[in-house]
Amino acid sequence: MTAMNRGGRSGKGVAVAKRRGAGTETGAGTSTGAGPGPGGSGAGRAERRTDPASTAPAAGRREVRLLLAPLAACLVIAAPVVLLDSVPPLVMLLLIGPLLACVRLGVRHTLVVCCWSAALGLLMGWGDGTLLTGTFVVDWSWLLFGCALTVYTARQRDRLTRTLAHVREVARVTQEVILRPVSRTLEGTRVCTRYYSAVRESAVGGDLYDVAVTPYGLRVLVGDVRGHGLEALRLTAETIAGFRELAYTTADLTTLVDRLDARLGPDLGPEDFVTALLAEFAPGEVRLVNCGHPAPLRAGHRIELLEPSCSTTPLGLSPDPRQYRVRLQPGDRLLLYTDGLAEARDPTGAPFPLLGEAALALREPLPEDALHSLYARLVAHTGASPADDVALVLCQPTDRRAAAHAQVP
Protein backbone atom coordinates (compact mmCIF):
# COMPACT_ATOMS: atom_id res chain seq x y z
CA MET A 1 0.00 0.00 0.00
CA THR A 2 2.89 2.36 0.66
CA ALA A 3 4.20 1.92 -2.82
CA MET A 4 0.82 2.37 -4.29
CA ASN A 5 0.17 5.56 -2.37
CA ARG A 6 3.29 7.05 -3.94
CA GLY A 7 1.54 6.75 -7.30
CA GLY A 8 -1.87 7.85 -6.07
CA ARG A 9 -2.40 10.13 -3.09
CA SER A 10 1.22 11.28 -2.76
CA GLY A 11 1.47 11.92 -6.48
CA LYS A 12 -1.51 14.24 -6.26
CA GLY A 13 -0.04 16.17 -3.35
CA VAL A 14 3.24 16.71 -5.18
CA ALA A 15 1.31 17.70 -8.28
CA VAL A 16 -0.58 20.46 -6.48
CA ALA A 17 2.61 21.81 -4.93
CA LYS A 18 4.40 21.82 -8.25
CA ARG A 19 1.55 23.58 -10.03
CA ARG A 20 1.36 26.25 -7.33
CA GLY A 21 5.09 26.81 -7.45
CA ALA A 22 4.93 27.35 -11.18
CA GLY A 23 2.28 29.98 -10.63
CA THR A 24 0.78 28.96 -13.49
CA GLU A 25 -5.36 17.92 -10.64
CA THR A 26 -20.51 3.82 -16.50
CA GLY A 27 -18.75 0.79 -18.56
CA ALA A 28 -15.99 2.57 -20.68
CA GLY A 29 -16.02 4.17 -24.05
CA THR A 30 -14.46 2.28 -26.87
CA SER A 31 -13.33 4.35 -29.79
CA THR A 32 -13.87 1.47 -32.15
CA GLY A 33 -17.57 1.08 -31.65
CA ALA A 34 -17.09 -1.34 -28.82
CA GLY A 35 -19.80 0.27 -26.81
CA PRO A 36 -22.86 -1.44 -25.42
CA GLY A 37 -24.11 -4.18 -27.63
CA PRO A 38 -26.42 -7.13 -27.59
CA GLY A 39 -23.84 -9.19 -25.81
CA GLY A 40 -24.51 -7.45 -22.55
CA SER A 41 -21.98 -4.64 -22.59
CA GLY A 42 -24.45 -2.47 -20.73
CA ALA A 43 -24.13 -4.62 -17.65
CA GLY A 44 -22.13 -1.93 -15.91
CA ARG A 45 -25.14 0.34 -15.78
CA ALA A 46 -27.61 -2.40 -14.99
CA GLU A 47 -26.49 -2.26 -11.38
CA ARG A 48 -27.45 1.40 -11.16
CA ARG A 49 -31.00 1.01 -12.49
CA THR A 50 -34.19 -0.58 -11.27
CA ASP A 51 -37.02 -2.12 -13.23
CA PRO A 52 -39.97 0.33 -13.35
CA ALA A 53 -42.42 -2.59 -13.33
CA SER A 54 -41.00 -3.91 -10.06
CA THR A 55 -41.19 -0.50 -8.34
CA ALA A 56 -44.71 0.41 -9.52
CA PRO A 57 -46.62 -1.45 -6.72
CA ALA A 58 -44.43 0.11 -4.03
CA ALA A 59 -44.90 3.57 -5.53
CA GLY A 60 -48.68 3.02 -5.62
CA ARG A 61 -48.78 2.04 -1.96
CA ARG A 62 -46.70 5.08 -1.05
CA GLU A 63 -49.13 7.39 -2.88
CA VAL A 64 -52.08 5.85 -1.04
CA ARG A 65 -50.37 6.47 2.30
CA LEU A 66 -49.60 10.06 1.32
CA LEU A 67 -53.21 10.58 0.24
CA LEU A 68 -54.59 9.38 3.56
CA ALA A 69 -52.76 12.09 5.53
CA PRO A 70 -54.52 15.17 4.05
CA LEU A 71 -57.87 13.36 3.99
CA ALA A 72 -57.52 12.51 7.69
CA ALA A 73 -56.41 16.07 8.51
CA CYS A 74 -59.58 17.50 6.97
CA LEU A 75 -61.73 14.96 8.79
CA VAL A 76 -60.14 15.84 12.13
CA ILE A 77 -60.92 19.53 11.53
CA ALA A 78 -64.54 18.94 10.50
CA ALA A 79 -65.57 16.25 12.99
CA PRO A 80 -65.75 18.45 16.15
CA VAL A 81 -67.88 21.05 14.35
CA VAL A 82 -70.35 18.43 13.09
CA LEU A 83 -70.54 16.45 16.35
CA LEU A 84 -70.30 19.29 18.92
CA ASP A 85 -72.48 22.37 18.66
CA SER A 86 -70.21 24.42 20.92
CA VAL A 87 -67.29 24.38 18.45
CA PRO A 88 -67.32 27.35 16.03
CA PRO A 89 -67.05 26.40 12.33
CA LEU A 90 -63.58 27.16 10.93
CA VAL A 91 -64.14 26.34 7.28
CA MET A 92 -60.89 27.89 6.09
CA LEU A 93 -58.88 25.43 8.18
CA LEU A 94 -59.97 22.72 5.74
CA LEU A 95 -57.49 24.24 3.30
CA ILE A 96 -54.75 22.46 5.26
CA GLY A 97 -55.60 19.19 3.49
CA PRO A 98 -55.21 20.52 -0.09
CA LEU A 99 -52.02 22.35 0.91
CA LEU A 100 -50.53 19.09 2.21
CA ALA A 101 -51.65 17.30 -0.94
CA CYS A 102 -50.20 19.73 -3.48
CA VAL A 103 -46.76 19.50 -1.87
CA ARG A 104 -46.44 15.71 -2.12
CA LEU A 105 -49.14 14.48 -4.52
CA GLY A 106 -50.10 14.96 -8.16
CA VAL A 107 -52.99 16.88 -9.68
CA ARG A 108 -55.49 14.00 -9.54
CA HIS A 109 -54.94 13.24 -5.88
CA THR A 110 -54.86 16.93 -4.97
CA LEU A 111 -58.22 17.37 -6.70
CA VAL A 112 -59.62 14.45 -4.68
CA VAL A 113 -58.53 16.12 -1.45
CA CYS A 114 -60.02 19.46 -2.60
CA CYS A 115 -63.39 17.83 -3.26
CA TRP A 116 -63.23 16.14 0.13
CA SER A 117 -62.45 19.49 1.81
CA ALA A 118 -65.29 21.26 -0.01
CA ALA A 119 -67.76 18.54 0.94
CA LEU A 120 -66.68 18.63 4.57
CA GLY A 121 -67.05 22.42 4.49
CA LEU A 122 -70.69 22.08 3.42
CA LEU A 123 -71.20 19.46 6.11
CA MET A 124 -69.77 21.82 8.73
CA GLY A 125 -72.14 24.58 7.63
CA TRP A 126 -75.12 22.21 7.73
CA GLY A 127 -74.17 20.83 11.13
CA ASP A 128 -73.77 24.31 12.60
CA GLY A 129 -76.89 25.69 10.94
CA THR A 130 -75.01 28.46 9.11
CA LEU A 131 -75.10 26.89 5.64
CA LEU A 132 -77.20 29.68 4.08
CA THR A 133 -75.64 32.63 5.89
CA GLY A 134 -73.52 35.18 4.09
CA THR A 135 -70.53 34.61 6.33
CA PHE A 136 -70.43 30.90 5.53
CA VAL A 137 -70.83 31.53 1.80
CA VAL A 138 -67.86 33.90 1.84
CA ASP A 139 -65.71 31.49 3.85
CA TRP A 140 -66.63 28.53 1.65
CA SER A 141 -65.92 30.57 -1.49
CA TRP A 142 -62.45 31.39 -0.18
CA LEU A 143 -61.97 27.69 0.51
CA LEU A 144 -62.84 26.87 -3.10
CA PHE A 145 -60.46 29.57 -4.32
CA GLY A 146 -57.65 28.17 -2.16
CA CYS A 147 -58.37 24.66 -3.43
CA ALA A 148 -58.11 25.91 -7.02
CA LEU A 149 -54.70 27.42 -6.23
CA THR A 150 -53.47 24.14 -4.75
CA VAL A 151 -54.55 22.24 -7.87
CA TYR A 152 -52.68 24.76 -10.03
CA THR A 153 -49.62 24.42 -7.77
CA ALA A 154 -49.73 20.62 -8.06
CA ARG A 155 -49.98 20.91 -11.84
CA GLN A 156 -46.95 23.19 -12.00
CA ARG A 157 -44.98 20.91 -9.71
CA ASP A 158 -45.82 17.89 -11.88
CA ARG A 159 -44.67 19.76 -14.98
CA LEU A 160 -41.39 20.78 -13.35
CA THR A 161 -40.87 17.21 -12.12
CA ARG A 162 -41.34 15.82 -15.64
CA THR A 163 -38.99 18.44 -17.05
CA LEU A 164 -36.36 17.63 -14.44
CA ALA A 165 -36.71 13.90 -15.15
CA HIS A 166 -36.21 14.57 -18.86
CA VAL A 167 -33.15 16.72 -18.20
CA ARG A 168 -31.68 14.03 -15.94
CA GLU A 169 -32.26 11.38 -18.59
CA VAL A 170 -30.55 13.52 -21.22
CA ALA A 171 -27.65 14.07 -18.81
CA ARG A 172 -27.45 10.33 -18.09
CA VAL A 173 -27.33 9.47 -21.79
CA THR A 174 -24.71 12.15 -22.38
CA GLN A 175 -22.62 10.86 -19.49
CA GLU A 176 -22.81 7.30 -20.79
CA VAL A 177 -21.54 8.52 -24.15
CA ILE A 178 -18.47 9.73 -22.26
CA LEU A 179 -18.09 6.54 -20.21
CA ARG A 180 -19.79 3.74 -22.10
CA PRO A 181 -19.81 0.38 -20.31
CA VAL A 182 -17.85 -2.47 -21.88
CA SER A 183 -18.02 -6.17 -21.26
CA ARG A 184 -16.59 -7.97 -24.27
CA THR A 185 -13.48 -9.38 -25.90
CA LEU A 186 -11.38 -6.89 -27.89
CA GLU A 187 -8.27 -7.90 -29.82
CA GLY A 188 -7.92 -11.13 -27.85
CA THR A 189 -8.39 -9.47 -24.43
CA ARG A 190 -11.52 -9.68 -22.34
CA VAL A 191 -12.34 -6.18 -21.04
CA CYS A 192 -14.92 -5.46 -18.36
CA THR A 193 -15.55 -2.04 -16.83
CA ARG A 194 -17.50 -0.61 -13.92
CA TYR A 195 -18.00 2.97 -12.77
CA TYR A 196 -19.46 4.01 -9.43
CA SER A 197 -20.07 7.72 -8.93
CA ALA A 198 -19.94 9.21 -5.45
CA VAL A 199 -22.65 11.69 -6.50
CA ARG A 200 -26.05 10.03 -6.57
CA GLU A 201 -27.49 12.30 -9.29
CA SER A 202 -24.50 11.84 -11.60
CA ALA A 203 -23.25 8.86 -13.58
CA VAL A 204 -19.87 10.48 -14.22
CA GLY A 205 -17.51 12.31 -11.87
CA GLY A 206 -13.80 13.00 -11.90
CA ASP A 207 -12.66 9.46 -12.74
CA LEU A 208 -12.36 8.35 -16.35
CA TYR A 209 -11.44 5.46 -18.58
CA ASP A 210 -11.54 4.55 -22.24
CA VAL A 211 -10.66 1.63 -24.50
CA ALA A 212 -9.45 1.83 -28.09
CA VAL A 213 -8.57 -0.89 -30.60
CA THR A 214 -5.79 0.71 -32.64
CA PRO A 215 -3.29 -0.38 -35.30
CA TYR A 216 -0.81 -0.72 -32.42
CA GLY A 217 -3.00 -3.00 -30.36
CA LEU A 218 -5.62 -2.65 -27.66
CA ARG A 219 -5.04 0.49 -25.59
CA VAL A 220 -6.66 1.31 -22.27
CA LEU A 221 -6.71 4.62 -20.40
CA VAL A 222 -7.66 5.03 -16.74
CA GLY A 223 -7.38 8.43 -15.10
CA ASP A 224 -8.54 10.75 -12.37
CA VAL A 225 -9.27 14.44 -12.85
CA ARG A 226 -8.62 16.59 -9.80
CA GLY A 227 -11.84 17.83 -8.25
CA HIS A 228 -15.52 17.11 -8.76
CA GLY A 229 -18.56 18.72 -10.33
CA LEU A 230 -19.09 20.21 -13.77
CA GLU A 231 -15.50 21.37 -14.15
CA ALA A 232 -14.22 17.86 -13.49
CA LEU A 233 -16.77 16.49 -15.97
CA ARG A 234 -15.52 18.92 -18.61
CA LEU A 235 -11.90 17.86 -18.10
CA THR A 236 -12.98 14.21 -18.13
CA ALA A 237 -14.63 14.67 -21.52
CA GLU A 238 -11.63 16.54 -22.92
CA THR A 239 -9.18 13.91 -21.70
CA ILE A 240 -11.18 11.05 -23.21
CA ALA A 241 -11.65 12.96 -26.47
CA GLY A 242 -7.91 13.58 -26.68
CA PHE A 243 -7.12 9.92 -26.03
CA ARG A 244 -9.60 8.74 -28.64
CA GLU A 245 -8.04 11.00 -31.23
CA LEU A 246 -4.37 10.34 -30.43
CA ALA A 247 -4.55 6.61 -29.73
CA TYR A 248 -4.90 5.80 -33.43
CA THR A 249 -2.20 8.07 -34.76
CA THR A 250 0.58 7.74 -32.18
CA ALA A 251 2.89 4.76 -32.44
CA ASP A 252 4.13 4.55 -28.83
CA LEU A 253 2.62 5.35 -25.45
CA THR A 254 5.25 7.85 -24.31
CA THR A 255 4.65 10.05 -27.34
CA LEU A 256 0.93 9.67 -26.83
CA VAL A 257 1.28 10.97 -23.26
CA ASP A 258 3.38 13.93 -24.42
CA ARG A 259 0.80 14.90 -27.04
CA LEU A 260 -2.11 14.42 -24.66
CA ASP A 261 -0.38 16.59 -22.07
CA ALA A 262 0.20 19.32 -24.65
CA ARG A 263 -3.43 19.14 -25.72
CA LEU A 264 -4.82 19.40 -22.19
CA GLY A 265 -2.42 22.08 -20.96
CA PRO A 266 -4.32 25.16 -22.24
CA ASP A 267 -7.58 23.93 -20.69
CA LEU A 268 -6.19 23.28 -17.20
CA GLY A 269 -6.37 25.79 -14.39
CA PRO A 270 -3.50 26.71 -12.06
CA GLU A 271 -4.12 23.70 -9.80
CA ASP A 272 -5.68 21.27 -12.27
CA PHE A 273 -4.12 18.01 -13.35
CA VAL A 274 -5.08 14.52 -14.48
CA THR A 275 -3.44 11.36 -13.17
CA ALA A 276 -3.35 8.75 -15.92
CA LEU A 277 -2.38 5.15 -16.53
CA LEU A 278 -2.09 3.91 -20.11
CA ALA A 279 -1.83 0.25 -21.04
CA GLU A 280 -1.11 -1.32 -24.42
CA PHE A 281 -1.67 -5.07 -24.82
CA ALA A 282 0.53 -7.25 -27.00
CA PRO A 283 0.83 -11.06 -27.17
CA GLY A 284 2.13 -12.22 -23.79
CA GLU A 285 2.76 -8.77 -22.33
CA VAL A 286 1.35 -5.37 -21.47
CA ARG A 287 3.16 -2.05 -21.89
CA LEU A 288 2.43 0.57 -19.26
CA VAL A 289 2.97 4.30 -18.77
CA ASN A 290 2.02 5.67 -15.35
CA CYS A 291 1.59 9.42 -14.76
CA GLY A 292 1.01 9.80 -11.03
CA HIS A 293 -1.74 7.18 -10.94
CA PRO A 294 -2.22 4.19 -8.58
CA ALA A 295 -0.25 1.22 -9.90
CA PRO A 296 -2.21 -1.51 -11.68
CA LEU A 297 -2.68 -4.88 -10.07
CA ARG A 298 -1.81 -8.21 -11.69
CA ALA A 299 -3.60 -11.32 -10.44
CA GLY A 300 -2.42 -14.74 -11.49
CA HIS A 301 -0.38 -17.32 -9.61
CA ARG A 302 0.13 -14.48 -7.15
CA ILE A 303 -1.23 -10.97 -6.79
CA GLU A 304 1.04 -7.92 -6.99
CA LEU A 305 1.14 -4.22 -7.76
CA LEU A 306 2.99 -3.31 -10.96
CA GLU A 307 4.88 -0.27 -9.76
CA PRO A 308 6.87 1.76 -12.33
CA SER A 309 10.64 1.87 -11.91
CA CYS A 310 10.48 5.68 -11.76
CA SER A 311 7.41 7.82 -11.19
CA THR A 312 6.40 10.90 -13.16
CA THR A 313 3.98 13.75 -12.69
CA PRO A 314 0.35 13.77 -13.86
CA LEU A 315 -0.87 15.24 -17.11
CA GLY A 316 -0.89 19.00 -17.02
CA LEU A 317 2.36 19.15 -15.04
CA SER A 318 4.82 18.45 -17.89
CA PRO A 319 5.33 14.73 -17.21
CA ASP A 320 8.40 12.80 -18.35
CA PRO A 321 6.71 9.52 -19.33
CA ARG A 322 8.61 6.23 -19.15
CA GLN A 323 7.25 2.98 -20.53
CA TYR A 324 7.74 -0.37 -18.78
CA ARG A 325 6.73 -3.88 -19.84
CA VAL A 326 5.15 -6.68 -17.83
CA ARG A 327 4.82 -10.30 -18.96
CA LEU A 328 1.37 -11.86 -18.78
CA GLN A 329 0.94 -15.59 -18.34
CA PRO A 330 -2.16 -17.52 -19.38
CA GLY A 331 -4.93 -16.78 -16.88
CA ASP A 332 -3.40 -13.53 -15.62
CA ARG A 333 -5.72 -10.62 -15.02
CA LEU A 334 -4.83 -6.93 -14.96
CA LEU A 335 -6.91 -4.61 -12.78
CA LEU A 336 -6.76 -0.87 -13.44
CA TYR A 337 -8.54 1.35 -10.93
CA THR A 338 -8.68 4.82 -9.43
CA ASP A 339 -7.84 6.11 -5.97
CA GLY A 340 -11.46 5.77 -4.86
CA LEU A 341 -10.56 2.11 -4.40
CA ALA A 342 -6.96 2.48 -3.27
CA GLU A 343 -7.56 5.18 -0.66
CA ALA A 344 -10.94 4.11 0.77
CA ARG A 345 -11.13 3.90 4.56
CA ASP A 346 -13.55 2.55 7.13
CA PRO A 347 -15.14 4.77 9.83
CA THR A 348 -12.13 4.20 12.10
CA GLY A 349 -9.67 5.33 9.41
CA ALA A 350 -8.34 1.87 8.52
CA PRO A 351 -7.39 1.66 4.82
CA PHE A 352 -9.02 -0.78 2.46
CA PRO A 353 -6.83 -3.94 2.24
CA LEU A 354 -6.58 -3.83 -1.52
CA LEU A 355 -4.31 -6.81 -2.17
CA GLY A 356 -6.14 -9.18 0.14
CA GLU A 357 -9.65 -8.22 -0.93
CA ALA A 358 -8.71 -8.14 -4.62
CA ALA A 359 -7.17 -11.60 -4.33
CA LEU A 360 -10.48 -12.95 -3.02
CA ALA A 361 -12.70 -11.02 -5.45
CA LEU A 362 -10.68 -11.87 -8.55
CA ARG A 363 -11.16 -15.58 -7.91
CA GLU A 364 -14.58 -15.21 -9.47
CA PRO A 365 -14.48 -16.88 -12.89
CA LEU A 366 -16.47 -14.16 -14.70
CA PRO A 367 -14.95 -10.66 -14.90
CA GLU A 368 -18.33 -9.06 -14.24
CA ASP A 369 -18.77 -11.07 -11.04
CA ALA A 370 -15.20 -10.29 -9.98
CA LEU A 371 -15.71 -6.53 -10.22
CA HIS A 372 -19.08 -6.75 -8.51
CA SER A 373 -17.52 -8.73 -5.67
CA LEU A 374 -14.66 -6.26 -5.32
CA TYR A 375 -16.98 -3.28 -5.06
CA ALA A 376 -19.22 -5.12 -2.60
CA ARG A 377 -16.16 -5.75 -0.42
CA LEU A 378 -15.26 -2.07 -0.65
CA VAL A 379 -18.73 -1.01 0.49
CA ALA A 380 -18.62 -3.55 3.31
CA HIS A 381 -15.31 -2.08 4.46
CA THR A 382 -16.37 1.58 4.34
CA GLY A 383 -19.80 0.86 5.80
CA ALA A 384 -21.50 2.94 3.09
CA SER A 385 -21.06 4.01 -0.49
CA PRO A 386 -17.50 5.34 -0.92
CA ALA A 387 -17.01 9.09 -0.67
CA ASP A 388 -14.97 9.15 -3.90
CA ASP A 389 -15.70 7.93 -7.41
CA VAL A 390 -14.48 4.44 -8.29
CA ALA A 391 -13.55 3.33 -11.80
CA LEU A 392 -12.59 -0.30 -12.41
CA VAL A 393 -11.25 -1.89 -15.58
CA LEU A 394 -10.45 -5.60 -15.58
CA CYS A 395 -8.48 -6.97 -18.54
CA GLN A 396 -7.76 -10.64 -19.16
CA PRO A 397 -5.95 -11.82 -22.30
CA THR A 398 -7.55 -14.96 -23.68
CA ASP A 399 -5.68 -18.16 -22.92
CA ARG A 400 -5.04 -18.79 -26.61
CA ARG A 401 -3.48 -15.35 -27.16
CA ALA A 402 -1.30 -15.57 -24.05
CA ALA A 403 -0.26 -19.15 -24.70
CA ALA A 404 0.80 -18.32 -28.24
CA HIS A 405 3.46 -15.99 -26.85
CA ALA A 406 4.35 -17.94 -23.73
CA GLN A 407 7.00 -19.93 -25.60
CA VAL A 408 8.89 -16.82 -26.69
CA PRO A 409 12.00 -16.37 -24.46
Image (spheres, rainbow, N blue to C red):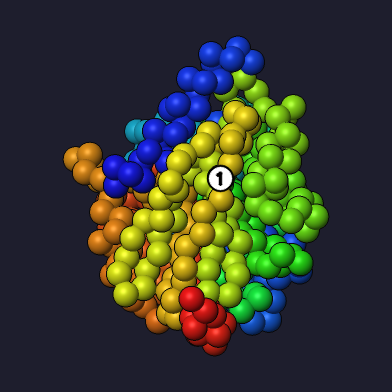
Residue at screen point 53% across, 69% down: 285
- Judged from this view, the residue extending furthest toward the left is 348
Horizontal relation, residue 304 to residue 264: left or right: left
* Image spot of residue 59 (x, y percent): 50, 63
Say above or below: 223 vs 26: above
* Image spot of residue 28 (x, y percent): 62, 61
Residue 347 in sight: yes
Residue at screen point 43% across, 27% down: 13
Horizontal relation, residue 389 to residue 115: left or right: left
Disc 1: which residue:
322
Please tell me which residue lies in front, 371 or 185: 185
Say above or below: 286 vs 1: below
Residue at screen point 25% across, 61% down: 356
Q: Quadrant of residue 332?
A: bottom left
Q: Quadrant of residue 238?
A: top right
Circle 1 residues within 10 Å: few <14, some 14–19, many ≥20: some
Mark 1: which secondary structure? loop
